[in-house]
């Protein structure tokens, strides 16, 4: 990432009616950011192989370092692996379960 405009300052996590805004540090995964904010996202392998940590991208974009769990249709519909997802762009909002 070449400048501060390539990643959001804050990631918003939505779970039901609650919203948590967490400061984002470049290079962190969504899972790292969620944990630092005190949120618990279910995980298993943390390698991008199982899909346990899947969240739904509601706004923004995310680059996944590895994805051996989600189908192209799931990715197209906004699913991302939080353990592999690196936010990009100015905004990132995800829905957790």
Image (spheres, helix red, strand yellow):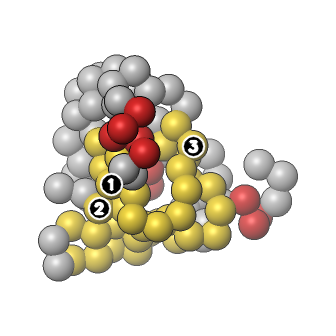
Q: Determine which quarter of the picture holds residue 90.
A: bottom right
- Which is more toward the observer, 91 or 26? 91
Which residue is identified by label 1?
A: 56
Q: Determine which quarter of the picture holds residue 56.
A: bottom left
Circle 2: element type: strand
Which residue is identified by label 3?
A: 63
Q: How many marks?
A: 3
Local packing at callout 2 (Cα closer than 10 Å; few below 14, some 14-19, many 20+) is: some
Examine the rendered structure and indicate whether residue 60 appears above or below residue 88.
below
> Which of marks 3 and 1 precedes in the sequence?
1
> Which of marks 1 and 2 precedes in the sequence?
1
Examine the rendered structure and indicate whether residue 1 appears above or below residue 12.
above
Q: CA distance from mark 1 to mark 3?
A: 13 Å
Is residue 84 found left or right of 79 in the rendered image?
Answer: right
Q: Determine which quarter of the picture holds residue 61.
A: bottom right
Residue 55 picture location, percent across and down: 31, 50
Q: CA distance from mark 2 to mark 1?
A: 5 Å
Which residue is identified by label 2?
A: 95
Circle 3: element type: strand
Residue 11 picture location, percent across and down: 47, 66
Q: Residue at coordinates 44% horizontally, 50% vertically from top-left?
A: 30
Circle 1: element type: strand
Q: Are marks 2 and 3 in contact (CB under 8 Å)?
A: no
> Which of marks 3 and 2 precedes in the sequence?
3
- Which is more toward the observer, 59 or 20? 59
């Amino acid at each position: 990432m070449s400048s501060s405009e390539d990643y959001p300052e804050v990631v918003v996590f939505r779970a039901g009616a609650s919203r948590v805004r967490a400061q984002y540090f470049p290079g962190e995964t969504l899972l790292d950011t969620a944990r630092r904010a005190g949120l618990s996202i279910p995980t298993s392998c943390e390698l991008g192989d199982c899909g346990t940590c899947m969240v739904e991208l509601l706004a923004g974009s995310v680059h996944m370092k590895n994805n051996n769990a989600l189908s192209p249709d799931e990715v197209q519909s906004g699913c991302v692996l939080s353990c592999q997802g690196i936010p990009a762009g100015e905004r990132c909002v995800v829905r957790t379960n």
